[in-house]
Image: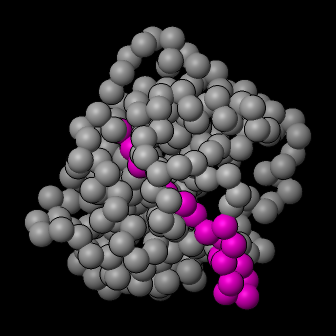
Amino acid sequence: MRITVVTAVHAPSARFLPEAYASLCAQELPAGWEWRWLIQEDGHTDEVRPYVPDDPRVTFRQGRPGGPGVARTIALAHAVGPYVKVLDADDQLTEGALARDLAALEADPAVGWATSRALDRLPDGSTSGFPGDPAEGHVERGAVLAHWSANDFRAPVHPATLFVRRELLLALGGWMALPASEDTGLLLALDAVSRGWFTTEPGLLYRKWDGQMTGHADHVDTAERAARMAVAERRARSLATFEWTF
């Protein structure tokens, strides 16, 4: 059985791929399980391929630029197996992260997705946690949207830690076609139709660096941010009204 790990990458973040790869290689999975890594460049350059590991478990493809959500979604065409794990090019999994995600979903077929605690990895190598993480266990349908709406569009769990059933991900159309917050939009959609799971053990080191897209001025543009949040919320609320449950 296979877990497909999906990574969107652009030229500035390519230099971090070896560290992401090392964190994948350190994962231990139960007998009969394996991972495969789909790296999808958001564009066509000569700057990413030199950082792609020479490993038969790793596949590298390129496509016309459209943002990380488009890159991840197009990579789904090649995903195999029951589960998809997100790993951004500049992030790293912690030891045991994949096994914990897998255990949560294998234990409860009614759980569609899992997330875990994330730690910021600062430029000096130190880490910093986020305040207000939920308790370990089930995340009930609608809980993410309710918290997000009441806390200035801050989700209670981190979308960069997402582990999700592949068929559910496909049914929702993958990541949203937004210039940013596409992963939050997906998380809200998942929350609208399925219970989730949160693991308090840190599962991701979220790198903070000058070139990351969330640090760009456009990311906090007031008008664009309002539009992104509005469409993500309306999608989630529309899904909830259909009363379709995974």
User: Residue at 23% of width from left, 70% of height from top?
Assistant: 29
Where, quadrant-wise, is the N terminus in this rendering?
bottom left
Q: Position of residue 134 (x, y in %)?
A: 57, 48
Q: Nearer the viewer, residue 108 or 20?
A: 108
Q: Position of residue 12 (x, y in %)?
A: 65, 75
User: Residue at 23% of width from left, 78% of height from top?
Assistant: 56
Q: Answer yes or no: is residue 144 visible.
A: yes
Q: Nearer the viewer, residue 142 or 24?
A: 142
Q: Is residue 120 magenta?
A: yes
When the figure is inspected, residue 148 is found, relative to residue 237, above or below; the finding is below
Where, quadrant-wise, is the C terminus in this rendering?
top left
User: Residue at 56% of width from left, 32% of height from top?
Assistant: 143
Quadrant housing residue 129: bottom right
Residue found at the far left of this picture: 32
User: Residue at 43% of width from left, 46% of height from top?
Assistant: 137
User: What range of the chain is rendered magenta?
Assistant: 112-129
Q: Answer yes or no: is residue 75 visible.
A: no
Q: Position of residue 117 (x, y in %)?
A: 54, 60
Question: On the picture, is 116 further left or further right than 35?
Answer: right
Q: Is residue 230 magenta?
A: no
Residue found at the far front of this picture: 135
